[in-house]
Image (tube, rainbow, N blue to C red):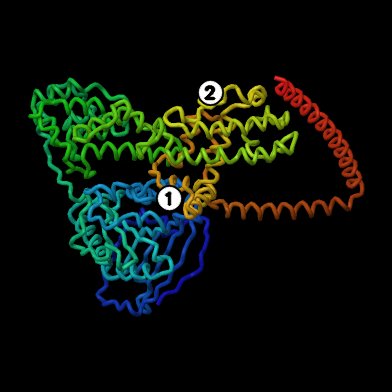
């Protein structure tokens, strides 16, 4: 039997949730003292209640599931987090999960990008995708992340499967909802043989419940569809994670001779003593992308002293080439690859027996993308990939035999700003973004033409008006200024239709294409950036970052056979397709902050309710005070006098403002007359 309670919205997560991290006997799942009684689960009643998240009530919801026996009482508890990805604004998925908890953050970063889509390597990389039973079906729909399962008095291996089945049958596990679990949490590494044995038991229990590994990560997933490939995969055929397959080999004794040949400070860490060459190549993982110490002579000296040192593995399973790739150390990668073929360094290009299960090339690409995602998630800004790391990737690809159509410098330019389609102009303006901006720059002027032909002074709620600075707005926008602004936007569209860097909508390119037109616009303080700011911001508002009306329009046009929209739909997708802040930065728009505005997920609803209640109480107090004052006639007379004085002052101020507006309009009209004469 199952019963479900209505949604509750509390000010903070329940005590059970808050205590999860402190009550782990081992990762995620607790086994209590076992009872000798054989538990008849058919007599149990299951109750389900939900708790909305305080900050993100529309996106996150805790699901509490309790199993109660008529005589034994509560015998098991399950807690899961339901994530409504459809409610996440584009790019906010990782930020929301990162703020929830360390465990949710690790889970999200391991599997998804910032848009909540499964990472490409888990679908496309032949090794990292594991059994390959998971694909793009994980990109959409809600997520159920099982946080905790507990058994009270009885065997966890009996109670947990029952709880998972009840969760799968509940209203919160729809056919489009995938359930995830991390049996071995990264926050609680296995310690000791007994602990490892328990973790293995937990892993096997989930596999018996049809949970299968996503790629070679530590995360397991359950598909509600019985026909899903994961449901027909035998548990014995499921792969191990790359951490589980890593075989550590201690070779620290190799480093003793070379370490003695160098002067090592007494307070340096043990890693420097045991793996000095690795430490010189990658002194601190937190310094990724920063200037590295010169290691050319150190690498060559190590090879001369003992050739085996350039292939030695450290405690992470990294060879020096892996360490150099992970650090983005271009100089070290170049030096190691330049060693004689007898060194065997090139053979390490295919080596993936390490804690990440990746080759040197995959390590470097993984690291730069991880840094990008974390910077965008936690700081809202990203300064681009480091040139040294991109050069290291270029060298590794070339050493792997990949044909490189671009030169090293061209490759760095192409990849600097995160281009994944290899078609972005200057590495940041993708074909899809170009088309989106061109559409907006071409359609808005038609609306502006209707407005300037009807008004001598343009209304403030007209398109583009909010993108002009106060010093222009306070004079009033005249019809010829507004007409010329429309011309600037059409010119922006023409520029965007050009190829190469000439098609970048920079101020220089647009002004060159104008050929001296629109003098009234520029004489009166207008700038190309003002028009471009409107184009970019309007495009963002109509994108999935806003209301997605433009994208819906394109889908309708594709269905009707519009050639331009069909061409747009066939364009390669890119990480830069919705990166509006990057466009604002590269075009040096002065209003970049507006492109970093975060979505309101309704997390302040409770605060607002509390504030409203307080305001109502204050209003009631004010009413009581007014009633007391009304009894005093003198007080009323004083109030009337004050009101009369305020009214007189207000009227006088209004007249002055009107005069000021007339003077401003007159001043602006005279400027426009001069423009017309010219």
Q: Is residue 173 above or below residue 11?
A: below
Looking at the rendered structure, the secondary structure element under dot 2 is helix
Residue 617 placed where, x, y %?
70, 55
Q: Quadrant of the C terminus?
A: top right
Please state if 648 lies on the left or on the right of 210 as rendered.
right
Q: Indicate the position of residue 543 as horizontal and vertical percent values.
A: 51, 46
User: What residue appears at the point 23 percent right and 53 percent down from the top-left corner?
Assistant: 130
Q: Quadrant of the N terminus?
A: bottom left
Mark 2, Cα crowd under 10 Å, few <14 / some 14-19 / many 20+, is: few
User: Image height check: is 4 above or below 303?
Assistant: below
Q: Depth check: 531 or 110 in front?
A: 531
Residue 187 picture location, percent across and down: 31, 49
The residue that mark 1 highlights is: 100
Query: Mark 2 or 1, which is nearer the eye?
Result: 2
Q: Which residue is mark 2?
A: 512
Q: In this view of the protein, can residue 99 be seen by the observer?
A: no
2 and 1 marks in contact (CB < 8 Å): no
Q: Nearer the viewer, residue 310 or 125?
A: 125
In-front residue for pair 426/540 = 426
Image quadrant where residue 204 sits? bottom left
Find numbered disc 1 in the image and state the secondary structure of the residue it sits on. Answer: helix
Q: Label 1 crowding class (10 Å Cα cut-off): few <14, some 14-19, many 20+? A: some
Relative to residue 526, is residue 233 drawn left or right? left
Q: Which residue is found at the position 51% from the left and 56% from the top?
A: 58
Numbered circle sitting on residue 243: none
Residue 429 appears anywhere in the view? yes
* x then y, percent, for residue 352: 18, 42
Q: Earlier in the sequence, mark 2 or mark 1?
A: 1
Q: Is residue 96 above or below residue 516?
A: below
Separation of marks 2 and 1 at Cα, in angstroms: 50 Å
């Amino acid at each position: 039997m199952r019963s479900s309670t209505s949604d509750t919205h509390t000010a903070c997560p329940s005590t059970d949730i808050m205590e999860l991290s402190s009550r782990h006997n081992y990762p995620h799942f607790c086994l209590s003292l076992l009872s000798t009684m054989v538990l008849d689960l058919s007599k149990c009643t299951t109750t389900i209640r939900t708790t909305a998240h305080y900050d993100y009530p529309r996106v996150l919801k805790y699901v509490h599931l309790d199993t109660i026996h008529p005589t034994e009482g509560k015998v098991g508890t399950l807690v899961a987090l339901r994530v409504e990805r459809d409610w996440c604004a584009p790019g906010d998925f990782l930020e929301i999960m990162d703020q929830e908890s360390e465990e949710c953050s690790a889970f999200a970063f391991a599997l998804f990008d910032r848009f909540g889509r499964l990472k490409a390597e888990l679908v496309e990389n032949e090794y990292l995708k594991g059994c390959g039973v998971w694909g793009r079906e994980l990109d959409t729909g809600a997520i159920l992340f099982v946080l905790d399962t507990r058994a009270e008095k009885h065997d966890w291996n009996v109670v947990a499967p029952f709880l998972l089945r009840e969760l799968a049958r509940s209203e919160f596990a729809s056919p489009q909802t995938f359930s995830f679990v991390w049996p071995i949490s990264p926050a609680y590494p296995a310690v000791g043989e007994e602990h490892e044995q328990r973790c293995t038991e937990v892993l096997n229990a989930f596999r018996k419940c049809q949970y299968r590994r996503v790629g070679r990560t530590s995360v397991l997933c359950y598909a509600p569809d019985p026909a899903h490939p994961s449901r027909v995969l035998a548990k014995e055929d499921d792969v191990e994670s790359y951490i589980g397959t890593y075989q550590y080999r201690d070779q620290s004794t190799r480093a003793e001779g070379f370490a003695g040949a160098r002067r090592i400070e007494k307070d340096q860490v043990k890693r420097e003593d045991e793996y000095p060459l690795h430490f010189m190549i990658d002194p601190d993982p937190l310094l990724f992308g920063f200037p590295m110490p010169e290691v050319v002579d150190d690498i060559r000296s190590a090879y001369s002293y003992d050739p085996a040192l350039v292939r030695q593995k450290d405690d992470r399973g990294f060879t020096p080439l892996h360490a150099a790739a992970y650090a983005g150390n271009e100089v070290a990668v170049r030096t190691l690859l330049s060693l004689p073929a007898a060194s065997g360094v090139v053979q390490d290009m295919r080596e993936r027996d390490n804690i990440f299960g990746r080759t040197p090339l995959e390590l470097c690409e993984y690291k730069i993308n991880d840094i990008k995602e974390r910077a965008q998630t936690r700081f809202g800004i990203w300064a681009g990939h480091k040139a040294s790391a991109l050069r290291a990737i270029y060298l590794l690809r070339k050493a792997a035999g990949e044909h490189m159509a671009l030169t090293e410098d061209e490759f760095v330019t192409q990849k600097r700003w995160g281009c994944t389609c290899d078609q972005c102009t200057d590495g940041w303006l993708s074909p899809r973004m170009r088309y989106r901006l061109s559409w907006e720059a071409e359609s808005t002027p038609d609306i502006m033409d209707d407005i300037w032909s009807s008004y001598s002074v343009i209304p403030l709620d007209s398109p583009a008006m909010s993108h002009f600075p106060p010093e222009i707005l306070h004079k009033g926008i005249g019809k010829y200024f507004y007409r010329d602004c429309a011309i600037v936007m059409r010119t922006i569209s023409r520029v965007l239709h050009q190829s190469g860097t000439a098609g970048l909508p920079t101020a220089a390119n647009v002004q060159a294409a104008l050929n001296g037109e629109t003098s009234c616009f520029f004489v009166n303080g207008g700038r190309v950036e003002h028009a471009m700011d409107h184009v970019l911001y309007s495009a963002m508002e109509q994108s999935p970052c806003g209301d997605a009306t433009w994208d819906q329009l394109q889908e309708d046009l594709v269905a009707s056979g519009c050639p331009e929209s069909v061409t747009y739909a066939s364009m390669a997708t890119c990480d830069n397709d919705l990166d509006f802040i990057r466009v604002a930065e590269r075009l040096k728009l002065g209003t970049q902050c507006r492109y970093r505005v975060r979505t309101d997920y309704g997390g302040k609803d409770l605060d607002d309710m509390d504030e409203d209640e307080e305001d109502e109480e204050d209003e009631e107090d004010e009413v009581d005070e007014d009633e007391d004052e009304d009894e005093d006639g003198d007080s009323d007379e004083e109030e009337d006098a004050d009101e009369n004085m305020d009214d007189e002052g207000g009227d006088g101020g209004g007249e002055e403002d009107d005069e000021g507006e007339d003077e401003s309009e007159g001043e602006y009209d005279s400027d426009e007359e001069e423009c017309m004469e010219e």
